[in-house]
Image (cartoon, helix red, strand yellow):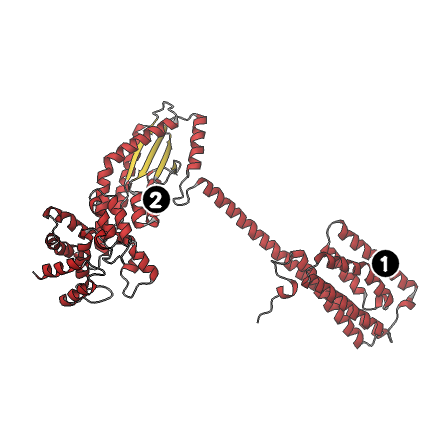
């Protein structure tokens, strides 16, 4: 067990600095009193002197108990000062004068008073002891008979030597320890001050900047606009930039990926504009750039540079990451001194017109990216979807669906697991059994896929099927717990075909089953997981 000084002097949480210093002083006072009693006894001095030292030890111990254990700081200080002012001079007179072992108490406790007090009280203590010492030494000089208790002059000088040595050592140790604690507190205060300055700087930065992108925020932007209006600045240009499809990314891949899109957009803006241009994120997916000292030609050049930057950024991303799609509008006052809010309104309107023109292309591009991402995350590099489309086409016709519905159910077969792009790879490809939390995460892919499909005109017709394709015939599926005929026919068909293809294909956690073993498993789960009538129909279809 490691000894800690806090065990003796009190921990920082429960004892202020002054209280801990008092405890230090009392500990050293106790040590000195005991030491004095021992040395006086070994020197064979007056028993009354030894008893006085022991009584002083008891007083120090009592004061320490009052201060450390009872935590009565004020009472302990008052008692100690009483000992300093009253008891110490009395002991000095009663126990051998200046040549005795008591005078060092004067030196010790005058230092104590100087440490514990401040201002005028500290001056009063020092002056008091100077006066008392001068008086007592004068008494000894005129009345040497008051120096008693020594058999020989040698004993007297040995006692003086011990007393002075003890006093010097004690004062040095006490002052060093106290200064050490003051230095610790000083260093801690410096650390707190530095942390406070950093925190203040961070708060100031955050008050003007967006936490995600590091760009200026709406508060700073509005203050800048008000300042521009006040100064009536001319030759201004304004860009309004909006991210297309950010809600789609947040809903499908999660807000971490959405934040990554925000950061990439901020990076593109920084590299496209000048360092002194004001670039601010003023909304969830909206940015504004204020450019000073520019004409119409310069605005067009900046627009083209931003488009080139976005194109380059998307080329460097790879196929499995959602590309940046930005709608951009800009306006310039052409030196006419047009109010900045009019410029903002004009740029905003141009941005929305561009968004309308780009909307179809953007949606198509995002869906293509999603398709690529799904293929890269499939167990067998996209072949599963193709096989499933072939299996389910004839099965759907056998079940009575019109041939005209084949395209939709094949699209459903290709995209039924699209929500898995929002599930972490380590869960999708885990070779061992899933934990309860991992199972809950993977079951979210139905809802994620539903949101993806709703955001695309191409996938919207199959969105409801994507949501419900893991429902069970007996109501034990997810996410809605539907049962029987409540489950769309297309979902019941896909569940059987998907299970058969999964069982007859290799997976990270097992080898492929044989055709007959897969058929037996379908029969076993008929009536619980699968529609029993459709299971029989599927077996007939697959064997035909």
User: Left or right: 3 with respect to 325?
Assistant: right
Q: Which of 459 and 190 is in front in this view?
A: 459
Residue at 64% across / 62% down in the picture? 10
Q: Would you identify the image quadrant in which residue 206 lies?
A: top left
Badge 2: few (under 14), some or many (20 or more) residues near its Cα, within 10 Å? many
Marks counted in the figure total 2
What label sits on residue 134 in the rendered view? Answer: 1
Q: Quadrant of the C terminus?
A: bottom left
Q: Which of 113 and 476 is in front in this view?
A: 476
Q: Would you identify the image quadrant in which residue 330 lies?
A: top left
Is residue 168 visible in the rendered image? The answer is no
Q: Name the residue under label 2.
A: 262
Q: Which of marks 2 and 1 is in front?
A: 2
What's the distance in space between the residues labelled 2 and 1, CA to CA? 81 Å
Q: Nearer the viewer, residue 457 or 543?
A: 543
Residue at 26% across / 34% down in the picture? 354
Q: Quadrant of the N terminus?
A: bottom right
| Residue 288 higher or lower than 69, as above or below | above
Residue 194 at x, y percent in the picture:
54, 49
Residue 141 at x, y percent in the picture:
90, 63
User: Left or right: 286 with respect to 413?
Assistant: right
Residue 257 at x, y percent in the picture:
32, 49
| Residue 489 higher or lower than 244, as above or below | below
Q: Nearer the viewer, residue 114 or 495?
A: 495
């Amino acid at each position: 067990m490691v000894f800690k000084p806090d065990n003796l002097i009190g921990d920082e949480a429960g004892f202020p600095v002054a209280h801990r210093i008092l405890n230090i002083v009392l500990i050293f006072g106790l040590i000195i009193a005991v030491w004095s009693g021992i040395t006086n006894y070994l020197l064979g001095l007056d028993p009354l002197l030894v008893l006085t030292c022991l009584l002083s030890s008891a007083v120090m111990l009592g004061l320490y108990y009052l201060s450390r254990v009872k935590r009565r700081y004020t009472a302990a200080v008052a008692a100690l000062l009483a000992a300093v002012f009253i008891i110490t001079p009395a002991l000095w007179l009663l126990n051998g004068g200046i040549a005795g072992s008591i005078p060092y108490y004067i030196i010790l406790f005058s230092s104590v008073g100087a440490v514990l007090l401040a201002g005028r009280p500290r001056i009063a203590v020092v002056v008091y002891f100077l006066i008392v010492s001068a008086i007592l030494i004068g008494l000894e000089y005129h009345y040497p008979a008051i120096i008693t208790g020594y058999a020989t002059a040698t004993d007297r000088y040995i006692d003086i030597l011990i007393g002075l040595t003890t006093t010097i050592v004690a004062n040095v140790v006490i002052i060093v320890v106290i200064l050490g604690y003051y230095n610790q507190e000083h260093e801690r205060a410096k650390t707190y001050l530095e942390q406070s300055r950093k925190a203040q700087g961070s708060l100031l930065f955050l008050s003007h900047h967006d936490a995600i992108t590091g760009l200026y925020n709406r508060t700073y932007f509005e203050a800048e606009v008000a300042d521009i209006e006040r100064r009536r600045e001319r030759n201004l240009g304004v860009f309004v930039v909006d991210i297309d499809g950010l809600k789609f990314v947040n809903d499908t891949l999660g807000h971490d990926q959405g934040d990554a899109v925000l950061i990439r957009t901020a990076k593109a803006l920084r590299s496209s504009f000048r360092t002194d241009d004001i670039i601010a994120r003023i909304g969830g997916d909206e940015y504004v750039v204020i450019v000073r000292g520019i004409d119409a030609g310069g605005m067009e050049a900046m627009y083209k540079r931003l488009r080139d930057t976005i194109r380059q950024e998307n080329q460097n991303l790879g196929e499995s990451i959602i590309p940046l799609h930005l709608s951009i509008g800009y306006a310039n006052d052409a030196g006419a001194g047009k109010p900045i809010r009019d410029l903002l309104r004009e740029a905003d309107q141009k941005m929305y017109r561009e968004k309308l023109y780009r909307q179809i292309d953007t949606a198509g591009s995002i869906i293509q990216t999603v398709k690529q991402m799904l293929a890269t995350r499939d167990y067998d590099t996209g072949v599963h979807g193709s096989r499933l489309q072939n299996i389910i086409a004839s099965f759907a016709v056998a079940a009575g669906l019109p041939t005209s519905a084949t395209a939709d159910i094949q699209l459903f077969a290709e995209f039924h697991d699209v929500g898995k792009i929002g599930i972490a790879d380590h869960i999708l490809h885990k070779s061992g059994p899933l934990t309860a939390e991992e199972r809950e995460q993977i079951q979210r892919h139905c809802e994620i896929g539903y949101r993806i499909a709703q955001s695309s005109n191409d996938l919207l017709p199959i969105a409801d099927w994507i949501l419900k394709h893991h429902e069970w015939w007996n109501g034990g599926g997810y996410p809605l717990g539907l049962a029987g005929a409540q489950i769309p026919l297309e979902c019941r068909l896909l569940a059987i075909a998907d299970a058969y293809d999964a069982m007859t294909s290799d997976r990270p956690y097992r080898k492929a089953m044989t055709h007959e073993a897969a058929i037996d498993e379908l029969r076993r789960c008929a009536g619980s997981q699968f529609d029993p009538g459709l299971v029989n129909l599927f077996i007939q279809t697959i064997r035909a």
